[in-house]
Amino acid sequence: MLKLGVPSKGRLMEQTFDWFGARGVTLRRAGSVREYSGAVDGIAGLELVLLAAGEMPRELAAGRIHIGVTGSDLVREKLADWDRQVAALAPMGFGHADLVLAVPTAWVDVDTLDDLDAAAAAFRRAHGHRLRIATKYHRLVRDFLRANGVADYQLVDSQGATEGTVKNLTAEAVADITSSGETLRANHLKILADGLVHASQATLYAARAADWAPGPRSALEALSRRTGFTAPAL
């Protein structure tokens, strides 16, 4: 059986069901809303597994599911060398959100990453410690800042209400997911002009470590023909 992991609740689950349904594959939850099982019509040999979106990268990397739907930001954040562990099969056109760097609007001279680098150096000279950037996306943000030559900062972990960390004096800047920027603006933060770290969307991935025996491989090829993605060599 080809195991397909789908987000277990909320808008992501509904949109995933709609995406497959529009392509002739009907996914549905089986049993009560408290049960994490489902059923599939339209493709033989396909089993539906309902998981939290945040668990999907781990399950894909371990090969416990063959394919799965989750945000591209989560895959890149949770999996080192992610493209060696999973293959992106299809961007799904929903779940859009941007991971961005934002600073206080009062920093009128800081609009770009070069400005942030200069401000971080000045901050360290003035305060004796590095400028703090609150985020839960440590890998993505660290790699982005390194690639753009920003130094003299430290990342501080924030697992909720990241936009409020500047107001609460636990950080000087933030890197967070946003779809409209309204919450950032409400907290008197502005996105740097070149501060887009990653444009995320829901994506269908295949696990390189899964057991790609003839049965699952055949079901994947049937699914690819039905939905329009190219089945990769795994």
Image (spheres, rainbow, N blue to C red):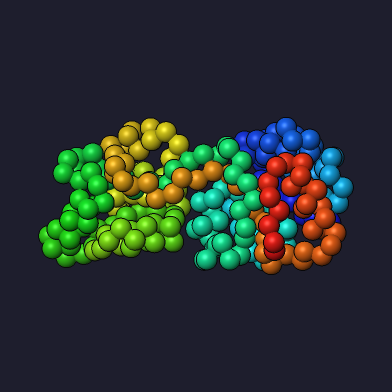
Q: Name the residue located 63 percent from the left edge and 46 percent from the top edge.
A: 90
| Vertical arrangement, residue 210 with respect to residue 21, above or below | below
Which corner quadrant holds the C terminus? bottom right
* Image coords of residue 211 (percent x, y): 77, 66
The foreground one among 175 and 86 is 86
Q: Quadrant of residue 61?
A: bottom right
| Vertical arrangement, residue 184 with respect to residue 112, above or below | above
User: For the view shown, which residue lies furthest in the left direction?
Assistant: 126
Q: Taking 186 as reference, is 108 left or right?
A: left
User: For the view shown, which residue lies furthest in the right direction?
Assistant: 44
Q: Taking 74 as reference, is 11 left or right?
A: right
| Vertical arrangement, residue 121 with respect to residue 24, above or below | below
Q: Quadrant of residue 14?
A: top right
Q: Name the residue located 81 percent from the left edge and 52 percent from the top edge.
A: 219
Q: Name the residue located 38 percent from the left edge and 32 percent from the top edge.
A: 182
Res. 166 in view: no
* Image coords of residue 157 (percent x, y): 40, 58
* Image coords of residue 95 (percent x, y): 56, 39
Q: Name the residue located 79 percent from the left edge and 38 percent from the top edge.
A: 25
Res. 190 in view: yes
